[in-house]
Amino acid sequence: MISIKILLLILSLCFIPFPVSAGNETDSIRQLLPHLQGEEKLSALSSLRSLAHADGNKDEEYRWINEYIKEAKRQNDVECIGDALLSRLYFFENYEMTDSIHKYHKNAIAEMRAFKAWDWMYNCWDVAVQYDLYHDRLESALRKAKKMYDDARQNKSYYGIGVALFDMGTIYQAIGRTDDAVYALRESVKTLRGEDNITLLLSAYNYLCSSLDGLGQYDEILQHTEDWKSVIDGYEKKAVSMGYTVSLDGKKLYNELAACVAEIGRGNLQNAGRHLSLAQEYARGRSASAQYKLLLTECRYYTAAGDYDKAIESGRKNAEMLRELGDSVSLATMETQLAEAYFRGDNFKEASALYRKLLPEKENLRVAELSRRLDEMRTMYEIDTLALESEASRVKLIGVASIVIFLLIVLMVTAAYLIRLRKKNKVFYDIIQKQETREKMMKIADAKAEDDPIGEEEDRLFSVVKSLMENNELYKDPTLNRESLAIAAGSNTVYLAEAIKRNMGQTVSEYITSYRLAHAAKMLSENPKAGIGEVEVDSGFNSRSTFSRLFKMRYGMSPTEYRAVSRGKKS
């Protein structure tokens, strides 16, 4: 039996910060390892795993994880088995080992199910869902989360239900189904509120408040931030009573930022400023993601308060940081907020320039997202179809009854696919409307900036071209091309191409097509009696196939689908 002195030494090595390197600490524990048994040996192996991870030693980390798993199974310690199996999945996730995640997560789930260790089982399940979500395989992630939810309900595991609801909420938020995200996250908070582990509960509060912000439900955000804060305070008090010192500044930061956003939305800037000040204190020395959220909220607060210089300063600082990180999606969000600060601060020249930069960038991001989403949905549908075809080959011998059942299943799968497609189209239609709003703001900024012209030849030429396209509607001429547009603008093709590239980031052909597609979308939405052929001709297209192909590339749906969604939104 190990002595008390050795046990205390292990604990000190694991938890007390000595001025020695991780390597020395690891060597000390390894020397003790052959003399340890039972819980002490499991604790030592767990510490060796953690130290290897902190040191970035991939091979050593994997070695100690496997040793930890073997010893936990030898001792039949269910809690340590769960912890070890989950650690291995996190290891695979950290090092992008996709095949290993797919191979081992099912085994981990099966092992924990055999022990009826539901919390560990659903934590292992969650890794696979979050991995798909992180890699934008949203349909796959949603399927796994829904399957987890059904399984957790069957096993009456409230923790599992809470995890599954949280996963569904974050996926719905990523897809853009904000109402569904809010519902799932509300239920997740209610369920997780009664669990001892508050980590996921705090994340659920954060995502819920973010989704509610998108719906403008600021009173409810405040209710949740108060409850959120009480959970943090209660956990700290409990830790102190047990003799532990914990730092939850990171959790407090997001709580204060959510409360700040709610007060901004309610027009109570005094309270918003108080929450922002606390958030700034909690953000000191924290990660880039925390700084991004803080600076984004600062820009929003100072814009609402009319202090546009500070708003622009926060926005520029955040944008610079995001460019260095290469986070194009967050950068687009930040620059949209920055453009609003310029606009509301009457700096129309900067606002116009930033809107011009944002529109093609957001278009590229959106088109890539639409293509990825459609490809994934098509893949999932093909998987369903292949599964059904395989089922059909087995039941052919059964007879007509089985064939009828198979056909019904095919119809159900097809119907489900079409429902998903319709929901997707509604989301994309909302995105399109937001983009049109940004374009209108850019035009207003352009008009107000005319009194303070940039003075460069390319910008003057672009103003002429823009006027010809918007006032004279030259794009309606199907023969319009770079040469004829240059002649109409009184310039040449080289200067024309440079002016459009500088101001819109597009080629001349792309610029003309963007006007034609915008006109077509407007006709489809506002003139329901016009036939698709009439829309095509009036917009300047001379080929039905070209019109349909380009329209679907931009808007993610066919002209007919776009008109159907538009009617549904207006009814």
Image (cartoon, grey):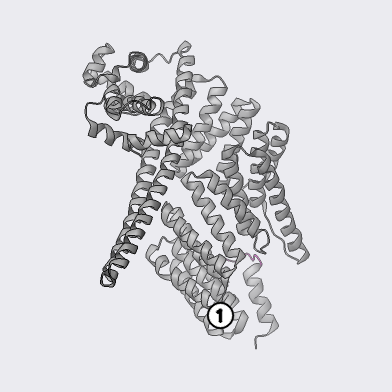
Residue 126 shown left or right of residue 103 in the figure: right
Q: Horizontal and vertical percent for residue 556?
A: 36, 39
**Residue shown at the point (45%, 68%) measured from the top left:** 105
Residue 278 showing in the rendered view: yes
**Residue shown at the point (45%, 43%) measured from the top left:** 327
- Kind of element beneath mark 1: helix
Q: Horizontal and vertical percent for residue 389?
A: 28, 63
Q: Nearer the viewer, residue 382 or 241?
A: 382
Could you classify mark 1 by the number of other residues whose Cα lies within 10 Å: few (under 14), some (14-19), or many (20 or more)? few
Magenta run includes residue 455: no
Q: Amino acid at mark 1?
A: Gln
Q: Horizontal and vertical percent for residue 170?
A: 52, 51
Residue 286 showing in the rendered view: no
Q: Horizontal and vertical percent for residue 6?
A: 66, 81
Quick check: 151 above or below 561?
below
Q: Main secondary structure of the magenta part?
A: loop
Residue at the front extreme? 400
Q: Which residue is mark 1?
A: 31
Question: Which segment is the magenta one?
Answer: 16-21
